[in-house]
DNA sequence: GTTAGTGCAAACCTTTTGCAGCTCT
DNA sequence: AGAGCTGCAAAAGGTTTGCACTAAC
C-alpha cells in the first residue's frame, strides 16, 4: 500500500490507525496532488459518508505536525485555504499560474544553494522551506494579452456611455 | 515624507488620498516591519479612533493589488493572519524562527538563480516570488534542547503518576 | 479496560460584502 | 457635482474547540 510509510511513522509515534485515518491517508498519498481540506473531505465522504469534516482537519494537523505532509498556500490562488502534499524526499518550489491556476513543481539545485547559504550565513537550523512563485505560464502569457484587450474594450464602452450621460 | 513614493503611485492611478489612507500609508511605511492587519488597525486607531478595521483591510488590498506592498504568511507562525511589508527593490526570503518568532531577511543572489532558472526552464513570467524558511535561529537551537529536556521530564512525571494509579 | 479518537454543534478568527451617508477632487 | 471612500453591521470562509460517545490497542 502506498501510504505504508506514513502509517509506519504514525504507529511508531503511538498514533492509533483508525478506519478514518487509514482512508484519509490513502487518499492523500494516492492523489499525488495538492488537495485542500474540503476536497479531501468530499473525496473521503464518498467512501465513508459518516466521516466528519473535523476529522479531516485533525488528521491533516497530525500529519503536518509529524512532518509527513507539507502545507502550501499556493499563492492564495483561490481563497485562504491550504493545500497539502506528502512530503517528498526533495525540496521543490511551487510555481502557480495566476491565470489558469496550474501548478508546476521546480526541483532545481538552486533551491539547495539558497538553503545552504541560509544555514551558513545565519547559523539557522532549517525545518522546512517553502518557495512559491506566482506569475503566468507560457500558455497563458499569450492569452493574457487578449484578456487585456477585452478589458480595455469593456472600459472604453463604459466610458463612452458615461460621457453620453455626462453630456 | 517617507511614504511619498507610494502616495505618488496611488495618485497616478487616480486613487483618492483620504485622511485614513494617508495615516495608514505612513504607518506601513515607517514601521519598516511585518505588520498584520490587526496590529496596523490598533496602531492607526490611536491616531484616529474612528477609523474602522474594514478600512484597514480595504487599504491593504488596494496596496497589494497595486504591487506596493507584499503579503506574507511567515509560515503561519501565529494563526492565519497575513503580514505586510512595503515592496523592496530587491527580492528576499523570510526566515522565521519557530521558537521565538523572530524574522530575518535573506537577500542572497541564490534567489535570483532560482528565479532565472524558473523563467528559462518553464518559460514562466514571474509576477512575484515568495520564499519562507522555518526553523530555529542560532540562539534558539540551544534553548530548544532545554525545552526538550523539560518536556521529557514532564512526560516522565506524568507516566510515574499514571503507574502509581494503575497499581 | 483505558485512553485516544470521533462526530456533532457551536465557536473562533480573519477577511469580505452590502448599503447608506460622507468627502475628496 | 459626483464618483469614490468610509463606517457600520452582518456574513462569509476556513479552521478549531468542548463534550459525550465510540473504538483501537
Image: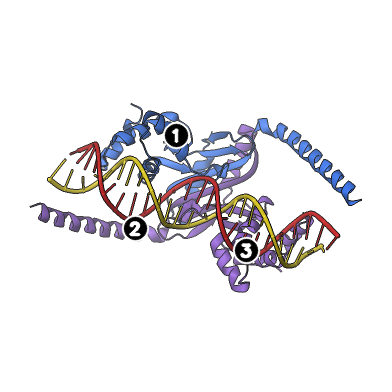
Chain colours: A blue, B purple, C yellow, D red
Q: Secondary structure at mark 3?
A: helix
From the top left corner, tell me how far across and down residue D18 is, in percent.
32, 56
Near mark 1 (Cα within 10 A), the count class, few <14, some 14-19 or many ≥20, is: some
| Disc number lying in front (2 or 1) | 1
Q: Which residue is mark 2?
A: B144
Q: CA distance from mark 2 to mark 1?
A: 39 Å
Q: In the image shown, does B129 or C24 lie closer to the viewer?
A: C24
Near mark 3 (Cα within 10 A), the count class, few <14, some 14-19 or many ≥20, is: many
N-term mark: 3 or 2: 3
From the top left corner, tell me how far across and down residue B69 is, in percent.
64, 55
Is residue A1 shown left or right of residue B161?
right
Q: CA distance from mark 3 to mark 1?
A: 41 Å
Is residue B58 shown left or right of residue A116?
right
Q: Residue at x 58, y 64 (%)?
A: B40
* Residues at discs 3 and 1 in contact (Cβ within 8 Å): no
* Chain that bears disc 2: B
Determine the residue located farthest toward the left in the rendered image: B167
Q: Residue at x 57, y 69 (%)?
A: B43
Q: Which residue is mark 3?
A: B28
Is residue C8 shown left or right of residue B85?
left
Q: CA distance from mark 3 to mark 2?
A: 33 Å
Question: Residue B77, located in which quarter of the rendered image?
Answer: bottom left
Determine the residue located farthest toward the top in the rendered image: A1
Q: Which residue is mark 1?
A: A42
From the top left corner, tell me how far across and down residue B149 is, in percent.
26, 58
In the rendered image, residues at marks 3 and 2 fall on the same chain: yes
| Disc number lying in front (3 or 1) | 1
Q: Secondary structure at mark 1?
A: helix
From the top left corner, tell me how far across and down residue B162 is, in percent.
15, 54
* Chain that bears disc 1: A
Quarter of the image for the N terminus of chain B: give it: bottom right
Amino acid at each position: 500500500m502506498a501510504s505504508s510509510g506514513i502509517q509506519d511513522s504514525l504507529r511508531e509515534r503511538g498514533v492509533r490507525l483508525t478506519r478514518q485515518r487509514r482512508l484519509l491517508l490513502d487518499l492523500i498519498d494516492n492523489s499525488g496532488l495538492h488537495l485542500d481540506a474540503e476536497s479531501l473531505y468530499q473525496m473521503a465522504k464518498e467512501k465513508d459518508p459518516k466521516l466528519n469534516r473535523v476529522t479531516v482537519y485533525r488528521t491533516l494537523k497530525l500529519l503536518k505536525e509529524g512532518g509527513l505532509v507539507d502545507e502550501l498556500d499556493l499563492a492564495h490562488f483561490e481563497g485562504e485555504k491550504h493545500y497539502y502534499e506528502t512530503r517528498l524526499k526533495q525540496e521543490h518550489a511551487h510555481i502557480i499560474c495566476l491565470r489558469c491556476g496550474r501548478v508546476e513543481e521546480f526541483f532545481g539545485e538552486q533551491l539547495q544553494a539558497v538553503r545552504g547559504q541560509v544555514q551558513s550565513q545565519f547559523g539557522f537550523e532549517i525545518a522546512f522551506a517553502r518557495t512559491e512563485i506566482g506569475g503566468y505560464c507560457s500558455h497563458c502569457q499569450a492569452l493574457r494579452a487578449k484578456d487585456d484587450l477585452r478589458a480595455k474594450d469593456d472600459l472604453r464602452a463604459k466610458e463612452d456611455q458615461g460621457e453620453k450621460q455626462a453630456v
